[in-house]
Amino acid sequence: MLARDVETRPAPACARCSHYWVTHQPATPHGCRMFGILSGRLPSMEIRMATGRDCEAFEERPAPSARPRGA
């Protein structure tokens, strides 16, 4: 895999992953519980930059329930 391929291919969508969380820290707003990452960039981009590969720990977050809020 060439470096330019890594940069042009879209990374996995962290916001849809069950391991992703928002840290609420201005300098490091993105977190990954699986890898213990806190970063200013999406964790999937950090993994891609470090390894040259896409994140293999991606797990689709369950869809929210259809129950109305406040019920």
Image: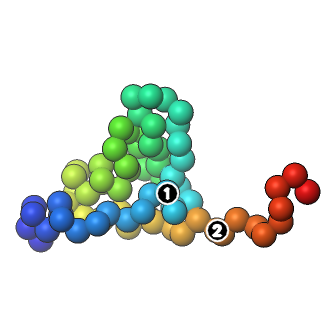
Choose the circle earlier in sequence order: 1 or 2: 1
Q: Secondary structure at mark 2?
A: loop
Q: In the rendered view of the protein, which quadrant contains the N terminus?
A: bottom left
Q: Distance from label 1 to label 2 (Cα)? A: 12 Å
Q: Secondary structure at mark 1?
A: helix
For this view, does 54 lie left or right of residue 60?
left
Residue where numbered disc 1 is placed = 15
Q: Is residue 36 above or below residue 18?
A: above
The residue depicted at 22 percent of the width and 51 percent of the height is: 50
Q: Position of residue 48 (x, y in %)?
A: 26, 57
The residue depicted at 24 percent of the width and 64 percent of the height is: 53
**Label 2: few (<14), some (14–19) or many (≥20) C-alpha neighbours in 10 Å:** few
For this view, does 4 lie left or right of residue 16?
left
Residue 62 marker: 2
Identity, as a three-letter code, of the amino acid under mark 1:
Ala
Q: Is residue 1 above or below residue 27?
A: below
Q: Is residue 45 above or below residue 29?
A: below
The residue depicted at 32 percent of the width and 63 percent of the height is: 11
Tally the marks.
2
Q: Position of residue 69 (x, y in %)?
A: 82, 55
